[in-house]
Image (tube, rainbow, N blue to C red):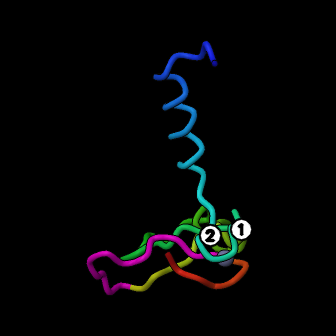
Amino acid sequence: MSNIPKEIVKKLFEDQSAKLSCPQCKSTNVAKILHGLPVMSPELQKDLDDGKVVLGGCTVFENMPHHHCNDCDTDF
Ligand SMILES: [Zn+2]
């Protein structure tokens, strides 16, 4: 039995699930896909160079993937 309040356990669980990992290979080397046309800035360029962000193009669909795995190239 644990004495940790349910609320805190729930919070911890939510924090963990908020940390993204690839559904295919479980990698956390995941980039955010930017949809639409972003305003280019030195910060954005650095994120692109670092593989933290990829550009999804200017066409926006419903239920389109928002993340890209850098390890197995899966969009999810
Ligand atoms: Zn992956």
Q: Is residue 37 visible?
A: no
Q: Secondary structure at mark 2?
A: loop
Q: Is residue 36 magenta?
A: no
Residue 64 on image: x %, y %: 36, 78
Main secondary-structure element of the magenta-colored stretch: loop
Location of the N terminus by quadrant is: top right
Q: CA distance from mark 2 to mark 1?
A: 5 Å
Q: Residue at x 59, y 17 (%)?
A: 4
In this picture, residue 56 sits left or right of residue 29: left
Q: Is residue 21 above or below residue 40?
A: above
Q: Nearer the viewer, residue 37 or 3?
A: 3
Whether residue 48 sits left or right of residue 33 in the image: it is right
Q: Position of residue 52 (x, y in %)?
A: 64, 67
Residue at the outermost top position: 3
Judged from the image, the secondary structure of the residue bearing numbered disc 1 is loop
| Label 2 near ligand 1 (CB < 8 Å) | yes
Cβ of mark 1 under 8 A from ligand 1: yes
The disc label shown at residue 72, or none: none
Magenta highlight range: 58-69
The residue labelled by disc 1 is: 27
Residue tagged 2: 22
Q: Amino acid at mark 2?
A: Cys
Answer with the quarter of the image where residue 27 lies.
Answer: bottom right
